[in-house]
Amino acid sequence: MVLSKEKRAYIKKFKEKLDRWSEKISDLAIDAGIENAEKQAEYQEHMERLHQKHKSLDDKVSGLKDADESAWERLKEEIESSWHDLKEKYEHVKSRLKKDIEKEKHK
């Protein structure tokens, strides 16, 4: 299947965005310098879920290459929704992490 210039550009743009976010997720994991073992386990779970969401989104974007015209728009909507979910989850984890780090500093 030959992809249009517009579709190739969309896939390339999204792949680049995903690469940047992979780094952000990894950086967040590094910043999770929590000493409490229970909290460490909790953040490990959050990080695994973020990586899973990222991988799932990456797979969807890769699947666009093989999508026919009728599936393209549907997949594109799924990707945009998954992207929103990933960003929302990341911000939630980041916010909780900052709060927990502040709590530990003030103990």
Image (spheres, grey):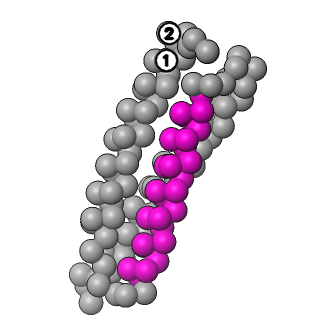
Q: Which residue is the site of mark 1?
A: 8
Quick check: marks 2 and 1 in contact, CB under 8 Å? yes
Tell whether 87 sits left or right of 81.
left
Query: Which type of secondary structure does the marked residue at label 2 adopt?
Result: helix
Task: Give the residue type at disc 1.
Answer: Arg
Do we see residue 69 in this rendering? yes
Task: Give the residue type at disc 2.
Answer: Lys
Do we see residue 73 in this rendering? no
**Looking at the picture, how far across and down is residue 3, in whole percent?**
56, 13
Magenta span: predominant SS is helix
Query: Is 36 situated above or below 17?
Result: below
Query: Which type of secondary structure does the marked residue at label 1 adopt?
Result: helix
Query: Is 19 situated above or below 2?
Result: below
Tell whether 99 sits left or right of 10.
left
Tell whether 100 sits left or right of 79.
left
Calculate the distance from the C-alpha at mark 2 to the C-alpha at mark 1: 5 Å
Q: In which quarter of the image is residue 26?
A: bottom left
Residue 33 falls inside the magenta stretch: no
Q: Which residue is the site of mark 2?
A: 5
Tell whether 81 sits left or right of 86.
right
**Looking at the picture, how far across and down is residue 32, in whole percent?**
31, 70
Dot 1: within a 10 Å radius of its alpha carbon, few (fewer than 14), some, or many (20 or more) residues? Answer: some
Residue toward you, 94 or 27: 27
The residue lying at 27 percent from left, 66 percent from top is: 31
Please give the range of residues in magenta: 39-64
